[in-house]
Image: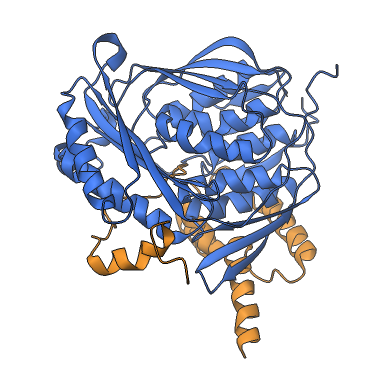
Amino acid sequence: LVERTMSRQTLSLMQLVYGKSTVNSTDVKKENDSSEGEESEDEFFKPKEEVEKQKRREGLDCGIVNSEDCSKTAKFADLKCWKDKDFEHIRDRFVTGDWSK
Amino acid sequence: MGKTAYKRLKGSQSFRQRLVLATLSSTPILIEDIRTDETWPGLQKHEVSLLRLLEKISDDCVVEINETGTKLKYKPGIIMGGKHLSHDCGVSRSIGYFLEPLLLLGLFGKKPLTIRLKGITNDPKDPSVDTFRSTTLPILKRFGVPSEGLDLKIESRGVPPNGGGEVVLAVPIVQSLTAVTWMDEGMVKRIRGVTFSARVSSQFENSMIHAARGVFNRLLPDVHIFTDHKAGPQAGNSPGYGISLVAETTSGCFISADTAISRARAEETSDFTDDEKKDLMPPENIGQQIAFSLLEEIEQGGVVDSTHQGLLFLLCALCPQDFSKIRVGKLSQHGIETLRNIREFLALKFVIKPDPNTGTVILKCIGSGLKNLSRKVS
């Protein structure tokens, strides 16, 4: 059972990054390429609803098409306030921590 | 020109990585729909500036932008490098935005690159120049980049909104990188850092250091944070202060966190309501917050911090056809986008496996075998 969950996790991470069904990667890639080519055929005007629909079909990726190009992710807003418990938790990541573990 | 096969892309996302990968893999690209539906459509100032910078350091590259800036054609040339170059990065993004792609491109140039960059040295959005010195350059050395000729000198500071900072970047050339097996993140043995203040009292720095030290003191005695007070022309055009921290581990990994505080850029004031609050954030809070955010990066347990994931993946992908294995903390959004871009341009996929015991992620790949073709054969 552990093994199975492990493999599922692996798959899901790969899926998260590279999209669905990463099992036979070469086929998928080809498919992706061709469909992209069709979509980007020069259509100058497009009703907005259609665009929205298409975006929804594309799923996850649509939101970030024009997202900001920024490597830094740390934001102060969602920073938790560190309590004593958290310090104990991280202590072993320092040379001053308990080495026996 | 008309016969060149362009790779078609959409939107302004990962603009820098697309350009870098296009250049390194000599793939002409055509980006459409750049912010078509937005109030300010098309390429933004810093993106155009980056394109100008690419033209500056390379030979025979062609950039075509349509009238509204929503469409871009880019045909990469040969990266020439060269000395005594200079570029004004403007004030819409900081110098860190330009350094990230420039470092990679410089490595694969014909001649070593020395370039003077003017603009904003520290801001909250991009990694600061201090972080580049303390963290990014050591990461490059891991991949076999020689340390001589690799340098970033900070000549003057500049913060938003008016900038005025100047740095000199030197990047050596390599024939190829060396693949790494970089799995041991080690334990934090020391924390270093640097604060800066420009056009404000140097007392701000002491407050930040005091607050940050207060957080680390219960974990580690070896904490040294240096100060860098600038005055006069070296302080740039706007007042501001900031801090950059780096945790060095027993296995030679560098984990960084940084930020800077200054008045917001004019165009941003309307967008963000919390600017007022940010402006007023006192140095004590900054010191504490940045210490917390460094601890959070340490907690993640990768060999690099979340900011440098993208760079790490790119370096692995650009290695010779050799096996690389690395460990990172939680995949960042930027890291994921990087992996996608790498697949797009280099047809290279990483094997990604979570390590449930430590909550980290292990990535394996075989490099694309990129050689520096523009380098002169001597």
The reply to whether residue B251 is visible in this rendering is yes
From the top left corner, tell me how far across and down residue B284 is, in percent.
Answer: 17, 42
Answer yes or no: is residue B28 visible.
no
**x, y percent for residue B220:** 33, 52
- Front-most of A13 and B194? B194
Is B133 rendered above or below residue B254?
A: above
Task: Tell me: residue B378, above or below residue B258.
Answer: above
Letter of the chain shown blue in the rendering: B
Residue displayed at 59% across by 76% down: A9
**From what the image shows, is residue B141 above or below residue A80?**
above
Q: Is residue B66 left or right of residue B257?
A: right
**Looking at the image, residue B290 lies above or below residue A81:** above
Furthest toward the bottom, the residue is A1
Residue under the point 38% across and 26% down = B121
- Residue A44 sits in quarter: top right
Give the residue at the far front of this rendering.
Answer: A100
Which percent across, then down, holds residue B122? 35, 30
- A7 or B17, nearer to the observer: A7
> Split into 4 quadrants, where in the image is the N terminus of chain B?
top right
Report the residue at 65% width, 79% height from top: A7
Q: Is residue B228 left or right of residue B327?
A: left
Indicate the quadrant where residue A95 lies: bottom left
> What quarter of the picture does the C terminus of chain B occupy?
top right
Coloring basis for residues = by chain
Return the x and y of residue A93 as percentages of the image width and height: 43, 60
Chain A is shown in which shade? orange
Of residues A94 and B278, the one drawn nearer to the viewer in this rendering: A94
Which of the 4 image quarters holds residue B200? top left
Using the image as rendered, state which of residue B285 and residue B219 is in the foreground.
B219
